[in-house]
Image (cartoon, helix red, strand yellow):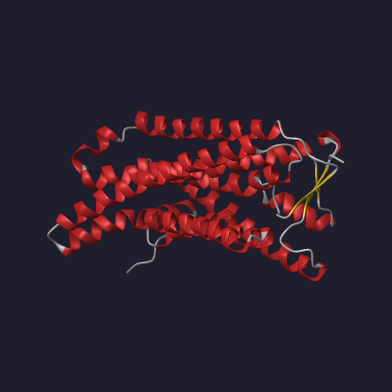
């Protein structure tokens, strides 16, 4: 007997990271702490950059945008997960599930595009330093961010509309702590071939394209640094992009880890656990990576908190 399509009355359940009752308090405390650190750290970057005129440069403009997007990115999933643990409920409505999926894909796409734009910014700064202020003017920076938003919104909207055409049965158990598009497509009662094609095409286009752009930028950067004769000059040039390179490596390595774990184990719970790395850990570490070895950010933070910098 074919499943009856009652999507609007369907009960969607987010099974979370673990169904063991004894682990729920530990998971709640851990994720609440990580979420608060993420929001506070990234908000501090946004406020510091906006309040310090010395940081009104393309690099820090993109960094503040990345920090804002990271706050939104984690906020699409973690508050709902914490609420479900606190209320001991796994339910999420169909409308909330679709909304969460839309914004998750939107901010994930923005993360990727902003990292790509930041790589281009470092490429221009190191490979074309004399023309940097002309090429990376405020108008171009605004256009780059706007285009990133437009492409991300269109991609997220397309995939969301594709999911809306699917039918779901009475009870939909999602073995994750948020509504992931891939899992929703797999759990649909109706034919999902077209959805799979669109999803993989978009993932390939929006994943490979920006990554290729980042690789190209850094290949040119490496070539330019190699041509610098002095060791001090090489170090200074490399230090300007070291933080961004660390964030890019962390983002793509954790994303690759999630993909490989899902391909190897075929376990949704294992994939959900691995996804914590790029959904929570990467946005949480970004402010630390950009501030620990960045003299401009340190100075701005000291000014922001009105604390005089230490001598020596």
Please, which residue is most extreme toward the front here?
A: 1
Up/down of 48 relative to 199, above or below: below
Q: Is residue 282 left or right of residue 78?
A: left
Q: Is residue 217 left or right of residue 190?
A: left
Quadrant where the C terminus lies? bottom left
Q: Position of residue 226 (x, y in %)?
A: 18, 57
* Residue at image location 64% in from the left, 46% down from the top: 182
Residue 298 figure quarter: bottom left
How many numbered dots are placed on residues in this image?
Answer: 0
Looking at the image, can residue 57 be seen?
Answer: no
- Residue drawn at x 40%, y 54% is 297
Foreground residue among 3 and 185: 3
Q: Position of residue 67 (x, y in %)?
A: 51, 47
Residue occupying the far left of the picture: 229
Residue at the image point whose x is 81% and y is 57% from the top:
86
Quadrant for the N terminus in the image: top right
Find residue 12 and report its horizontal and vertical position in percent: 80, 45
Identify whether 111 is placed above or below 20: above
Query: Residue drawn 74% across and 37% down?
Result: 190
Q: Is residue 97 left or right of residue 202?
A: right
Q: Position of residue 296 (x, y in %)?
A: 36, 53
Q: Quadrant of residue 143?
A: top left
Q: Could one spot residue 118 in this view of the protein?
A: yes
Quadrant of residue 87 within the rendered picture:
bottom right
Q: Nearer the viewer, residue 133 or 193?
A: 193
């Amino acid at each position: 007997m074919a499943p009856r399509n009652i999507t609007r009355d369907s009960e969607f359940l987010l099974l979370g990271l673990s169904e063991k009752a004894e682990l729920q308090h530990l998971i709640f405390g851990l994720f609440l702490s990580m979420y608060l650190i993420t929001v506070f750290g990234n908000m501090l970057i946004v406020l510091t950059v906006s309040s310090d005129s010395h940081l009104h440069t393309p690099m820090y403009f993109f960094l503040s945008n990345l920090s804002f997007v990271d706050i939104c990115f984690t906020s699409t999933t973690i508050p709902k997960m914490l609420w479900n643990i606190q209320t001991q409920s796994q339910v999420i409505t169909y409308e909330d599930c679709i909304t969460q999926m839309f914004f998750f894909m939107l901010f994930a796409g923005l993360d990727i595009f902003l990292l790509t734009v930041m790589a281009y910014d470092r490429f221009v700064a190191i490979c074309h330093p004399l023309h940097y202020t002309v090429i990376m003017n405020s108008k171009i920076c605004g256009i780059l961010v706007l285009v990133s938003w437009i492409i991300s919104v269109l991609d997220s909207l397309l995939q969301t509309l594709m999911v809306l055409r699917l039918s779901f049965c009475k009870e939909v158990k999602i073995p994750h702590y948020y509504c992931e598009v891939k899992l929703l497509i797999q759990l649909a009662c109706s034919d999902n071939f077209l959805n799979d094609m669109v999803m993989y095409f978009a993932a390939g286009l929006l994943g490979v394209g920006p990554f290729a752009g980042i690789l190209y930028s850094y290949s040119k950067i490496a070539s330019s640094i190699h041509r610098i004769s002095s060791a001090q000059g090489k170090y200074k040039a490399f230090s300007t992009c070291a933080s961004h390179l660390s964030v890019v490596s962390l983002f793509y390595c954790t994303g690759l880890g999630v993909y490989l774990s899902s391909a190897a184990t075929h376990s949704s719970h294992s994939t959900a656990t691995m996804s914590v790395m790029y959904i929570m850990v990467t946005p949480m570490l970004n402010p630390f990576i950009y501030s620990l070895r960045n003299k401009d950010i340190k100075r701005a933070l000291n000014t922001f908190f009105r604390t005089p910098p230490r001598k020596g």
